[in-house]
Every structure is written in C-alpha cells, then in structure tokens.
Amino acid sequence: MMRVSRSKVLTLAIGAAAALVSVLQPFGYSPDYPQYSYFFDQLRSDYLSQLRESRFELGFLHLSYLLTQIFRENVHVYGFFVLIAIGLKVYFAGRFSAKNYAWIFLVFYFFKFFPLHELTQLRAAMAASLLVVVFYYYSIERYWIALSISLIAIAFHNSAGLVLPFFLTPMAALTRGRIVLAALIVYVSCYLISDYLVGFLADRIVVFEMYINAGIESRRDAAFSPVFFPEFFLIALSFVCWRDLSGVMKKVLAIEVFGFAVFYGFIDLGVVAVRGRELFSVLWIVFVAQFPFAGKKIRAGIVFFVLASVLLSVYLYFVLDFFASELGY
C-alpha cells in the first residue's frame, strides 16, 4: 500500500482550503476577477479566436481552456488554479524550512501575497509559484528541471523573464560589496535601455502600450510605496547582520536587491516594472522559511518583518475595501 508523506497531505489540505476561499469569495470580488471570469466564458465559446486575440500568455491560455472543458462553473476553474498555485508554493517553500517553523512563512504568505496573487492576479500567482519551484531545483543543482520549469513560468507571465536570470547568481561569490556593486550596474543598465525598450515593445505589442500608460500619473508615487518599507528594513538588517544569514538567505537577499534595481531602473515601464517587482518579492517566503537557520538578530528582524507585512496587508486589502461586494463586468 502506497504511503503519502505528511507534508504532501498538509500541502493538499492547505491548497484545498485556499481554493475553497477563492470559490466562496468571502471577502468579495477582487478588481481582476471579472476579467478572468469573462475570459473563461470566451474560451468556452471561441477557443481559436482567443488564441489569436487574447493578451494572456499561452501557458495560461491553454491550461485555462483545458479546465473550462472540465469545469462548467468559472469559479471552479479559478479555484483549481488557486489549488495548483498554493500547493506548489507551500510544498517547495516548505522544503527550505523546518517542520516546527513552517507556520511562520505560511502566515506571511497568506496575508502578504494571497489576496493580491491568488485572489486577484491569477497569472502572476501561477508564475510566482513556478519561480519558487525553479529556485528550489536550482538550489539542489537539478539544472535541467529548473530550466524546463523556467520556460513554463514565462508561459504563464512574461514578467517572470525579468526574475529568472538572477537565479544564476552564484551563492559562493556573494559578499555585501559585490551585491551593492552588481545592483548599481543592473540599475544603470536598466535605466539606460528603458526608453529603447518602451519604444521597441510598444511598436510591436499592442497590449504593452496599454501597460505603459496604465497609472502613469502615480508611477513615481509607487516608487516609494509603504509596502516596500518592511522589505527595506529587512534588507538593511541583513547587510548589517550578514554573518547571521544562511547561504540561501544571502542568495534571496541578493535577488531581492537586484529586483529593486530592476524595478527602479525600469520604472518608466509602468505596470511591467510593478509586476516584475511583485514576482521578485515572492522569494521572501523562502527567506522567511529559513527562519530556523538564521542568527538571533535576523530571527527578530523576520518576526518584525512578518508582523509589519501582515498589518499593512490587512489595511490595504480589508480596511480600504480592495474587494467589491458585487461582481461587475
């Protein structure tokens, strides 16, 4: 008789609970939910037309079509995506933690990311999950698996392509000085080519121009969003308490610093830069999962980081009426 490990059972249970939340929508409907529901309806009625006209990436489009043929209700299609996305994150982030400490990164994820990703930006949620999987396989030197899943991640959200090159950062070569120097080079490079990219992509990809123009007035305000403050704190603390970090933490720290360099360098790319930053930030769950392997000062910093992130998320998603009580198209 085949035995299923406790971690896999727990992963399935947590994923199922998250999927149930997405099906029942107890908090109301997110701003992006109506467009996904409409998209699923369009897939059922004219799949070939969506292949030609949809702005969604092919990986998401094809899997969506398959699920719309299995489930009649859009909310069940959505829920199955959530089951996959949460299941992957819980299982593979859990591989970086210890059994008695996994609840810390789970609390962090479900407050900071779950409302924005799984309940709102479904494609980003899938891509973020696959990035965690890629990071795990790259960490254990299963490079071909990591490469294959990298391509799938991009097929769910193109912005994953901004994150993946930085996974190649060699852990053994990391020092604080090298991270800062490399981040400056990344920032300057992105800044110098951003104008060229805007013109090049806007001329060739219709939806890209829409992304560029989205929220153009508030773009500079977003550069110093309060959401970033806990991350800035943890980055600063990690540089000061470098010796208290595990090897995995140092690599995640470097990737997050590079992520901010990309974000600020590409700030004129609007939504594209923001989505890329969100995909970089999901790796904080791996950093938090490493809690039991950190020194005391970093552990204290992680506790503060998690609490600050939770409080900010409660305010942004539940106090400010992020979710709507009615579904509108």
Image (spheres, helix red, strand yellow):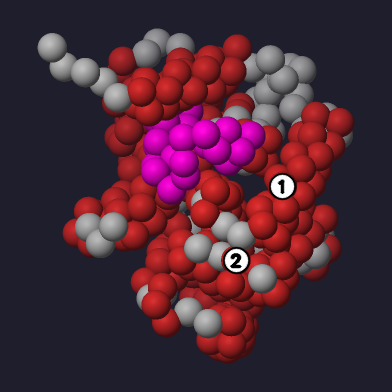
Disc 1 marks which residue? 303
Which residue sits at x=76%, y=18%? 325
Q: Amino acid at mark 2?
A: Asp
Which residue sits at x=22%, y=53%? 145
Q: CA distance from mark 1 to mark 2?
A: 15 Å
Categorize mark 2 by other alpha carbons within 10 Å: few (<14), some (14-19), many (20+). some
Taking the image as shown, residue 17 lies to the left or right of residue 235, namely left
Q: Are marks 1 and 2 in contact (CB under 8 Å)?
A: no
Categorize mark 1 by other alpha carbons within 10 Å: few (<14), some (14-19), many (20+). some
Mark 1 lies on a secondary structure that is helix
User: Measured along the vertical axis of the image, is residue 326 above or below residue 212?
Assistant: above
Residue 11, position as x, y percentages in the image: 42, 27
Which residue sits at x=25%, y=62%? 141
Q: Quadrant of the C terminus?
A: top right
User: Measured along the vertical axis of the image, is residue 327 above or below residue 323?
Assistant: above
Taking the image as shown, residue 169 lies to the left or right of residue 202, namely left
The rendered magenta stretch, by its main secondary structure, is classed as: helix
Residue 250, position as x, y percentages in the image: 52, 68
Residue 97 belongs to magenta span: yes
